[in-house]
Image (cartoon, rainbow, N blue to C red):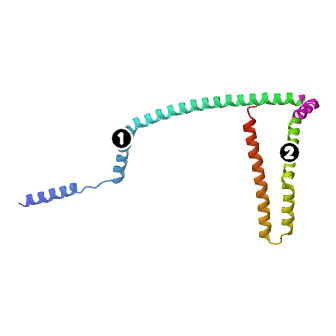
Amino acid sequence: MKKTATASADLADAVNKRGNVRIDTEKLTEHTVKVLDARLAKAVEAPVQRVEKTVAGLEERVSKLGKEKLAEVTSDAREVIATADQAERRVERLAGKVTWVMVGQVCQALVPFAVAFIVLGGLVGGATQMLGIGPLLGWAWDSFADASAWWAKALIALGALGGCVGFSWLIWWTGKKLYESYRGW
């Protein structure tokens, strides 16, 4: 019995020694990191290759598009430069051709407009004198100068300007009616 108890105690000590697990965390970390790194590299390798191929294709397309746009902009710039050169040559040719004779011809072409303006001004001036507009404006100016209150001056100015606007509108309306009635002649 004594022998069995001693053997039992020895066995119990041996089991306790073996049952006491001691883990070396540094070795476990190294081993786990190596395994995890290998598995991640294997799992990510195919998607990374696809992304690299896609990016390479995209770079080629962007490069090609950039070259095409650059060529297009360059051709547009050349067209603009050519057009500007043509315009500059035309201006240089015309600058040498403007003479006093041409200035006289332009002035001669403007003579009918000047005559029409003078005649129209004379007619309107005569009509204003005939209708008494000139004396009315003279009276309005004298009244404006004699008025001492600001509101009286404002009323006189508004009345005079309103009369001028009304007369101008009447002339415009009459001219429009005359134009419409004599347009077909």
Crowd rating for badge 2 (residues with CA inside 10 Å; few <14, some 14–19, many 20+): few
Q: Is residue 100 magenta?
A: yes
The image quadrant of residue 159 is bottom right
Residue plotted at (68% across, 30% down): 76
Q: Is residue 15 left or right of residue 176?
A: left
Under circle 2, the secondary element is helix
Quadrant for residue 15, please give it: bottom left
Looking at this rendering, what residue extends furthest in the bottom direction? Answer: 149
What's the amino acid at mark 2? Leu
Q: Residue furthest left?
A: 1
Is the magenta region chiefly helix, strand or loop?
Answer: helix
Query: Helix, strand or loop at disc 1?
Result: helix
Q: Nearer the viewer, residue 23 or 168?
A: 168
Q: Residue 129: horizontal and vertical position, in percent?
A: 87, 52
Which residue is the site of mark 2? 123
Q: Earlier in the sequence, mark 1 or mark 2?
A: 1
**Stretch of the chain drawn in magenta:** 97-110
Q: Amino acid at mark 1?
A: Arg
Q: Horizontal and vertical percent for residue 143?
A: 84, 66
Mark 1, Cα crowd under 10 Å, few <14 / some 14-19 / many 20+, is few
Instruction: Judge from the rendering whether residue 124 lies leftward or rightward of residue 3; answer left or right.
Output: right
Q: Quadrant of the N terminus?
A: bottom left
Q: Which residue is mark 1?
A: 39
